[in-house]
Image: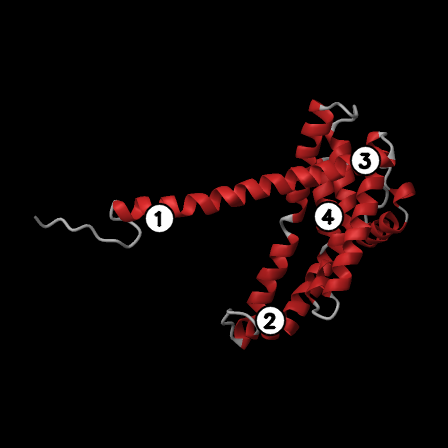
């Protein structure tokens, strides 16, 4: 992508969000995509830490968390980092699943993986620029809706441009990916819930899980 400076990264990210049809044609490799996401997320990360500290006490008081005032900076920083660090790698995983299903198995497009990941990187721009706003209670609901719309519009347009497919086909493949993800998560959650009682029962019967065995005759 053109422009390597810090300010240019933000300008380009805003251009991508406002007009994805024009500004999602350039392709980047995985390393460049990760660096780009972390770069445009730096200022929002700092803002997120500040917001988490400012609103952290009210969040802690309304939940079961026992967080002292002196711990708020650490709490706010950790929470912000959890909203920031995993994003590029989560997008990488989703892009890999997308490429496996629609590129390798169904062969809907012929582009290589870098084009797929680039599209998902572009789709991550709205979140990386605005995730700090989610932590403001008064704005959270509106921001989540706006982020969903902006992310969907950017990602679908980027997939269409990067893979050379129609907008409708890009939208359809995204919906299928979403459905597949929901199914996988549902199956995993159900499996965990069903396995938990069995594991607890086995632990109890063998003397584990806090149950002591009686070895006396």
Q: Marks 4 and 2: which is nearer the front?
A: 2
Q: CA distance from mark 4 to mark 1?
A: 42 Å
Does any portion of residue 27 appear in the rendered image? no
Q: Which residue is mark 2?
A: 59
> Residue 155 location in percent, x, y?
80, 43
- Specify which label sits upstream in the sequence, 1 or 2: 2
Query: Is 54 on the left-hand or right-hand side of 10?
Result: left
Q: What residue lies at 10% left-to-right and 50% top-to-bottom?
A: 216
Most distant residue in the left direction: 217
The CA distance from mark 3 to mark 1 is: 45 Å
The residue where tag 3 is placed is 170
Q: Nearer the viewer, mark 3 or mark 4?
A: 3
Q: Give the spatial CA distance, label 3 vs label 4.
A: 22 Å
Give residue 15's mark: none
Are the residues at dot 1 and dot 2 in contact (C-beta closer than 8 Å)?
Answer: no
Marking on residue 37 = 4
Classify 194 as above or below 10. above
Instruction: State the residue position of label 1.
Output: 200
> Residue drawn 71% across and 62% down?
134
Give neighbour class at mark 2: few <14, some 14-19, many 20+ (Cα, 10 Å): some
Query: Please, what secondary structure does the residue beneath circle 3 have?
Result: helix
Task: Give the number of marks.
Answer: 4
């Amino acid at each position: 992508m053109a422009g390597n400076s810090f300010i240019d990264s933000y300008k380009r990210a805003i251009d991508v969000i406002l007009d994805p049809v024009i500004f999602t044609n350039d392709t980047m490799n995985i390393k460049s995509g990760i660096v780009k996401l972390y770069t445009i997320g730096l200022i929002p990360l700092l803002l997120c830490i500040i917001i988490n500290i400012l609103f952290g006490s009210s969040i802690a008081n309304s939940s079961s968390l026992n967080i002292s005032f002196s711990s708020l900076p650490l709490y706010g920083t950790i929470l912000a980092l959890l909203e920031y660090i995993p994003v590029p790698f989560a997008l990488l995983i989703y892009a890999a699943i997308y490429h496996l299903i629609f590129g390798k198995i169904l062969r809907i497009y012929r582009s290589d993986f870098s084009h797929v990941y680039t599209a998902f990187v572009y789709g991550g721009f709205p979140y990386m620029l605005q995730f700090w706003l989610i932590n403001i209670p008064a704005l959270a609901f509106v921001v989540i809706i706006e982020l969903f719309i902006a992310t969907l519009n950017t990602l679908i347009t980027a997939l269409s441009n990067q893979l050379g497919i129609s907008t409708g086909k890009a939208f359809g493949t995204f919906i299928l990916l979403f459905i597949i993800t929901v199914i996988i998560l549902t199956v995993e959650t159900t499996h965990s819930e069903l396995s938990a009682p069995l594991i607890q029962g086995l632990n109890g019967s063998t003397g584990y899980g806090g149950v002591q065995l009686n070895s006396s005759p």
